Image (tube, rainbow, N blue to C red):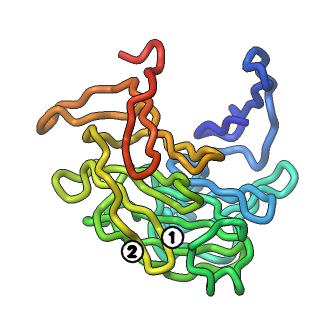
Amino acid sequence: MTFLDDTEQTYILSGDGKTKIEAQFGPPGNYISQSQSAVIKARLHIFGGTEDRSTTVRFKLLRLRLKFLKIMRLDDCTFVELSTKLGNRISTESAAISIDNNSKGLLKYIYLIYPFLALICFPARDFPAQNCEIFDGSQTSPSFPTVYSHHKGNLGVYNKQPTTVGSTDYVYGNRIVETFGENGWTRLADHPRDIHSHNLVGLDSGALLSIGGIERQGVGSKEYISDVWMLSDNSWTLIGNLPGVD
């Protein structure tokens, strides 16, 4: 399923990737634009993002201070905004990931309270972007901050632990990889390229894939890359390239 900025443009792609089916979700609007998402207790949740542009001016002014703090849950085919608010402003440069109680080495005392969680990190407009929070489906609580900044560093799973790679922030976080364990965040082997805006995919083997992204080429210059890198045994290996990336 693919959600675009406007919920009326949502569609479902078949398993073979050949058929696209329109999907109707309500209410209509672009309130999920610039948000992050995670599945908690088998329900999709949306974190942060902008307010609906179709909202009246008066309503926008009343809610301005809550921009990027909302949490929404998909109930059947309708997005419902929860009364709980995020502690940090979450947007496109942020990241969120689902964590379940099958994960190991992750703040085990938290799992006694929260059996299904979302880890939400790297607030918008923060520099450095290090703060994280936990959401259990009903309430949020602060979590360990990363050591380095990771705007647009994304979150994936490496050896069953949330892991972030790189940053769009110059110097403070570029190439740096951190993984989340019992005592907070620990630095791993640096990524071979200075990337951000990539995709991270955890494999059943415990390895982590870094797919595509943008590499900085000095101040004000960038390159879209097609690399597919794999992190295994704390070592990065280039295993392939995406076709058609210029």
Where residue 58 sits, quadrant-wise, is bottom right
Please tell me whether mark 1 sits on a helix, a strand or a loop. helix
Residue 211, horizontal then vertical, whole percent: 46, 34
Q: Residues within 10 Å of mark 2 (few under 14, many from 20)?
A: some
Residue 208, horizontal then vertical, whole percent: 51, 45
Looking at the image, which residue is at 61% across and 46% down? 205
Q: Looking at the image, tell me whether mark 2 or mark 1 is earlier in sequence order.
A: 1
Residue 218, horizontal then vertical, whole percent: 12, 36
Give the alpha-carbon distance from disc 2 to disc 1, as whole Å: 22 Å
Please tell me whether mark 2 sits on a helix, a strand or a loop. loop
Furthest-right residue in view? 76
Please give the label number shown on residue 145: 2
Rendered view: 212 above or below 104: above
Q: Residues within 10 Å of mark 1 (few under 14, many from 20)?
A: some
Residue 38, horizontal then vertical, whole percent: 65, 57
Closer to us: mark 2 or mark 1?
A: 2
In the displayed structure image, the side of residue 55 where residue 7 appears, left or right: right
The residue beneath circle 1 is 66
Q: Amino acid at mark 1?
A: Leu
Looking at the image, which residue is at 54% across and 62% down? 161
| The C terminus, quarter of image | top left
